[in-house]
Image (cartoon, rainbow, N blue to C red):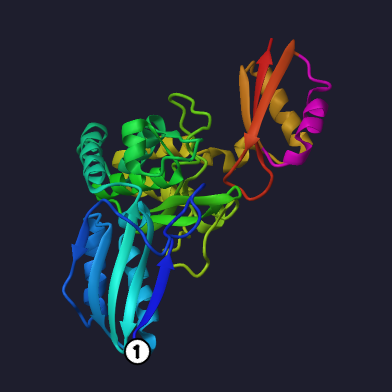
């Protein structure tokens, strides 16, 4: 008896993508033919090769265990799609139709893509060109990562229409969503020789992707999307999501706890402090990035934990006739009230203004406070 079984799986769908493939699909693109096989490993290899060539269909005869046939096909398909992060996230949708009889199946796999093969090759070419410009001989991985991160943030803009999903869109058209940012970060890090992964989860209430990078044997979260201001501000680079641990990232990102992603457990400020001692040749870089990432505001000298401490720091700044004061204030919920009290009896100035933003390196409601004085 011949039975027809349909197995469908929708690929990554960020921001606006939803739904499933219809049972009958017409393709104008390429198809790949493969000889029959009775090996799941060979079946996986054929699927990976088809995706790598951006084939829109793959027909293959497969022999296997009748009892687990459907499960094995779906598992092998999923495993093939997940075999490489870049391939995974340029696949738009994927699925299959299969006619099964006994332990035999005639399978027709179907794929659609966010990025064509020619577009991926263009990405690889442009990435290579960019790296030749921004990376210099003697750079270590920490310096390469910084150069790549800053280049991406200053050259791409977030696609608020949520239509562009690929690295190609970002490089050629200048706009893409988080998927494109993560793909471009992946390709640039990979070509620079830095181990990298793409992480799929959610942030700020929406589906989201970002990266994990390995530096000095330790993994860190890197989100080039959320480090790029929206709306775009030319030349501005944020470092709120630069080399964070799992614990720091989980403040506003989530991903499967049982996932295969490597753990990010070492705070990057500790890594930089160690490198300052062990790698004297690049101390200037480590000190600069320590400041840029805001780690200096974890130090007691740049932190106020009470109204009295805030008042004292303001008085000290005024006595020294500083133009501005930057300080982390741990009483974030009381900031406006405490500012009025701190300046109530302040002498020696004609006025002041202040602004503040969330301090992302601590899980509590800390604020990074900037005060400008008028004399």
Above or below: residue 365 compared with residue 26: above
Image check: 205 left or right of 233? right
Q: Residues within 10 Å of mark 1 (few under 14, many from 20)?
A: few
- Of the pair 173 and 133, the residue shown nearer to us: 173
Decide if residue 343 is in sight here: yes
Magenta range? 329-347
Q: Is residue 48 above or below residue 289?
A: below
Residue 54, horizontal then vertical, whole percent? 25, 54
Residue sitting nearer the eye, 202 or 293: 202
Q: Main secondary structure of the magenta part?
A: helix
Residue tagged 1: 1
Q: Quadrant of residue 68?
A: bottom left
Q: Secondary structure at mark 1?
A: loop
Looking at this view, is 173 or 208 the one in front?
173
Is residue 335 shown in magenta? yes
Q: Residue, x 75% and y 34% (percent of image)?
A: 335
Q: Is residue 233 magenta?
A: no
Left or right: where does residue 35 sit relative to residue 215?
left
* Quarter holding residue 224: top left
Q: Residue at x 42, y 67 (%)?
A: 8
Judging depth in this view, the residue of 273 and 133 nearest the camera is 133
Left or right of 71 in this view: 160:
right
Where residue 207 appears, x then y in whole percent?
53, 52
* Total labels drawn: 1
Horizontal placement of 361 versus 180: left or right? right
**Which residue occupies the extreme front position in the image?**
1
Counting from the top left corner in percent of width and height, residue 177 is at 45, 41
The reply to whether residue 349 is in sight is: no
Please say if 151 is above or below 51: above
């Amino acid at each position: 008896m011949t039975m027809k079984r349909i197995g469908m799986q929708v690929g990554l769908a960020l921001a606006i993508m939803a739904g499933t493939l219809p049972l009958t699909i017409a393709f104008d693109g390429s198809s790949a033919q493969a000889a029959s096989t009775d090996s799941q490993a060979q079946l996986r290899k054929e699927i990976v090769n088809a995706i790598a060539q951006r084939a829109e269909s793959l027909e293959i005869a497969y022999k296997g265990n009748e009892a687990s046939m459907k499960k094995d096909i779906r598992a092998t398909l999923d495993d093939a799609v997940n075999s490489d992060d870049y391939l995974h996230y340029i696949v738009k949708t994927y699925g299959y139709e299969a006619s099964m009889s006994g332990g035999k199946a005639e399978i027709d796999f179907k794929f659609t893509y966010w990025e064509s093969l020619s577009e991926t090759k263009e990405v690889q070419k442009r990435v290579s060109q960019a790296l030749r410009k921004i990376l210099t001989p003697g750079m270590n991985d920490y310096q390469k990562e910084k150069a790549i991160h800053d280049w991406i943030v200053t050259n791409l803009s977030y696609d608020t229409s949520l239509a562009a999903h690929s690295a190609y869109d970002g490089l050629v058209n200048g706009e893409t969503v988080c998927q494109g940012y993560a793909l471009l970060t992946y390709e640039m890090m990979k070509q620079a020789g830095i181990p990298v992964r793409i992480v799929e989860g959610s942030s700020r209430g929406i589906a989201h992707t970002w990266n994990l990078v390995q530096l000095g044997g330790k993994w860190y979260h890197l989100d080039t999307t959320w480090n790029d201001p929206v709306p775009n501000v030319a030349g501005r680079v944020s470092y709120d999501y630069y080399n964070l641990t799992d614990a720091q990232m989980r403040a506003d990102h989530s991903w499967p706890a049982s996932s295969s992603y490597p753990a990010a457990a070492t705070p990057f400020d500790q890594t930089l402090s160690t490198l300052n001692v062990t790698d004297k040749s690049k101390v200037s870089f480590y000190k600069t990035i320590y400041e840029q990432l805001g780690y200096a505001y974890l130090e007691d000298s740049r932190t106020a934990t009470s109204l009295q401490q805030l008042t004292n720091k303001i008085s000290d700044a005024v006595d020294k006739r500083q133009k501005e004061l930057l300080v982390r204030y741990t009483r974030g919920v009381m900031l406006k009230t405490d500012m009025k009290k701190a300046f109530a009896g302040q002498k020696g100035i004609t006025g002041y203004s202040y602004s503040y933003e969330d301090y992302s390196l601590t899980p509590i409601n800390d604020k990074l406070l900037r005060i400008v004085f008028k004399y």
